[in-house]
Image (cartoon, grey):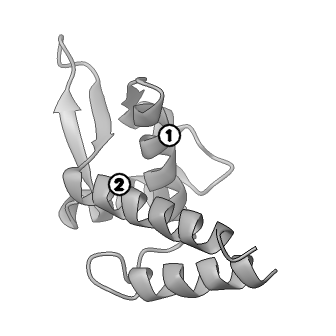
Amino acid sequence: MKSLFHFYTMTKELEAQAPYHDIDSVGKEILFMIGHACQHNQLIRVTDILKQQNLASSATLHARLKQLRERGLIDILPGADNRFKYLQPSSLALSYFNQLDKYLKKSSQLI
């Protein structure tokens, strides 16, 4: 359990910094969904996120997408025919994921 709480503490310290502070659990879940799709070389559309009614209402999901974009954590790319918009993590979000990965590896060495 020591490694778990070490990871938790480091994560909280990272998330207390701008631009990560004030991003709620819905925003984090969206960011991780986008990151997961990118990790697997998949494209995720705005409409895919808005269909996630188990997370929040469409209005809330849209607001969180806007917040993530304004904070520079996601990029919105037009589709080939402009009917769809695709989401990808920005370089800032990739840096965040890399830092979390480092924290996880560091914490696992405490075992």
Q: Name the residue at 43% across, 23% down.
A: 42
Q: Name the residue at 42% across, 80% down.
A: 15
Left or right: residue 65 versus residue 32 is left
Mark 2 is surrounded, within 10 Å at the Cα level, by few (under 14), some (14 to 19) or many (20 or more) other residues, namely: many
Q: Can you name the residue that lies furthest to the top here? A: 81
Screen quadrant of the C terminus: bottom right
Tell me the residue that label 1 is attached to.
36
Mark 1 is surrounded, within 10 Å at the Cα level, by few (under 14), some (14 to 19) or many (20 or more) other residues, namely: some
Asked which quadrant contains residue 57, the reply is bottom right
Asked which quadrant contains residue 26, the reply is bottom right
Q: Which of marks 2 and 1 is nearer the N terminus?
A: 1
Q: Name the residue at 21% across, 45% down.
A: 75
**From the viewer's perspective, is the residue at label 2 or at label 1 nearer?**
1
Screen quadrant of the N terminus: bottom right
Identify the disc placed on residue 65: 2
Q: Where is residue 28 in the image (x, y as percent from the top left)?
A: 49, 63
Asked which quadrant contains residue 9, the reply is bottom right
Left or right: residue 102 versus residue 25 is left
> Mark 2 belongs to which amino acid?
Leu
Q: In this view, does 37 lie above or below 42?
A: below
> Mark 1 belongs to which amino acid?
His
